[in-house]
Image (cartoon, rainbow, N blue to C red):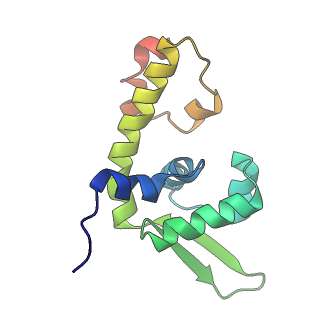
Amino acid sequence: MTDPVNPYHYVSGCISGKWKMTILHHIHHYGKIRFNETKKTLGVSEKVLSQQLKELVEDGLVERIQYNTIPLKVEYTLTPLGEGLIPALDILYIWSVRRLTALGLTVDPDAFEVHTEPKYTDQLKDILD
């Protein structure tokens, strides 16, 4: 028998890391990502992106698809488990934008570029106007 696991600690372990939530949303928004394009787009180091993608794959949230072509082609997609986490990430994103605004802190404008769907803009209409 294993020791009981705190659900908050478990989910925190899955999404903790400076870039994991951003990576998950990025994959959700684009449907799939490739390593080099994502590294350039997000401005994350190669080492950090590689490690965080590896952990997301190990946690079952992301699938790594390797095509046996020359040059080698690798894509990352969300698994159904990863897709199931997106609504929770959406709530955290909206809460965070509202909190940053209330604190008078500037929200990184890049955060709005991939959050253009009505599920975000409708919730943040008063802030975005």
Along the line of sight, which residue is nearer the eye, 128 or 98?
98
Please tell me which residue is depicted at 43% across the width and 65% down the height of the picture: 61
Q: Quadrant of residue 6?
A: bottom left
Query: In the visual, does 97 lie left or right of 51?
Result: left
Q: Quadrant of residue 36?
A: bottom right
> Does residue 69 lie above or below 116 as drawn?
below
Please tell me which residue is depicted at 68% across the width and 77% down the height of the picture: 73
Q: Quadrant of residue 113?
A: top right
Along the line of sight, which residue is nearer the eye, 73 or 56?
56
Along the line of sight, which residue is nearer the eye, 89 or 35?
89
**Residue 14: image x %, image y %?**
44, 59
Please tell me which residue is depicted at 62% across the width and 18% down the height of the picture: 106
Query: In the visual, does 3 lie left or right of 69?
Result: left
Residue at the bottom extreme, as displayed: 68
**Residue 114: image x %, image y %?**
55, 39
**Residue 98: image x %, image y %?**
44, 20
Q: Is residue 76 visible?
A: no
Residue at the left extreme, as displayed: 1
Query: In the visual, does 41 lie left or right of 10?
Result: right
Quarter that holds the N terminus: bottom left
Please tell me which residue is depicted at 51% across the width and 20% down the height of the picture: 100
**Residue 27: image x %, image y %?**
52, 56
Tally of numbered discs = 0
Q: Is residue 120 visible?
A: yes
